[in-house]
Image (cartoon, rainbow, N blue to C red):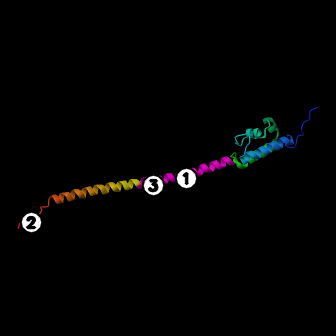
Amino acid sequence: MTHRPRITEDGVSAETATALRAAMLRLFAGKPQRTDGRLTKENLWREAQVSRATMNRAQPILTEWDARIAEHGKTTAGEMRRDAEISRLRKKLADKTRQCTLLEARLQAAATAIAALHHHNEALRAELTARTNNVVPIIAPRR
């Protein structure tokens, strides 16, 4: 006669319930051992190394899973850190883009001012040249 494990109030054996809860904790902590860490039921049964059917019999554990997902969402700790880093980098990029736009405007204004000064200097040089060409030099008398 084969020995059937005693079914607990979780709908599965105590060993299976422990494996599922441990897998759930690892997934929520962002420290999976056997999966990519996404918070999916497929990863739960794979992480616990039980079959999908066995996991589905553990309704109280799945209720805990669903409650945790409803409360905190399907984002793992690692994904939250990644998303926070992406958000921080996007904000930094937006700040740098604004700064770059401001500097480009200042550069354009400086280039315009320099060009205006250059043309003004050229006009003054031309005027000075025109004035000096019209001046008759005084010749000193001979002695």
Name the mark nearer the viewer: 2 or 3. Answer: 2
Residue 16: % across, % down: 83, 41
Q: Which mark is residue 25?
A: none
The region drawn magenta spans: 77-106
Q: Nearer the viewer, residue 36 or 139?
A: 139
User: What amino acid is found at the position of numbered circle 1 in the picture?
Assistant: Lys
Residue 34: % across, % down: 74, 40
Count of numbered marks: 3
Sequence-earlier tag: 3 or 1: 1
Give the side of residue 12 with respect to residue 33, left or right.
Answer: right
Is 79 within the magenta?
yes
Q: Which mark is residue 92?
A: 1
User: What amino acid is found at the position of numbered circle 2 in the picture?
Assistant: Ala
Q: CA distance from mark 2 to mark 3?
A: 62 Å
Sequence-earlier tag: 1 or 2: 1
Q: Which mark is residue 102?
A: 3
The structure residue drawn at horizontal position 19% and vertical position 57%, both measured from the top left corner, is 129
- Report the residue that reaches farthest toward the bottom: 143
Q: Nearer the viewer, residue 70 or 111?
A: 111
Residue occupied by mark 2: 140
Image quadrant for the N terminus? top right
User: What amino acid is found at the position of numbered circle 3 in the picture?
Assistant: Leu
Give the side of residue 138 with respect to residue 66, left or right.
Answer: left
Image quadrant for the C terminus? bottom left
Instruction: Give the quarter of the image for residue 59.
Output: top right
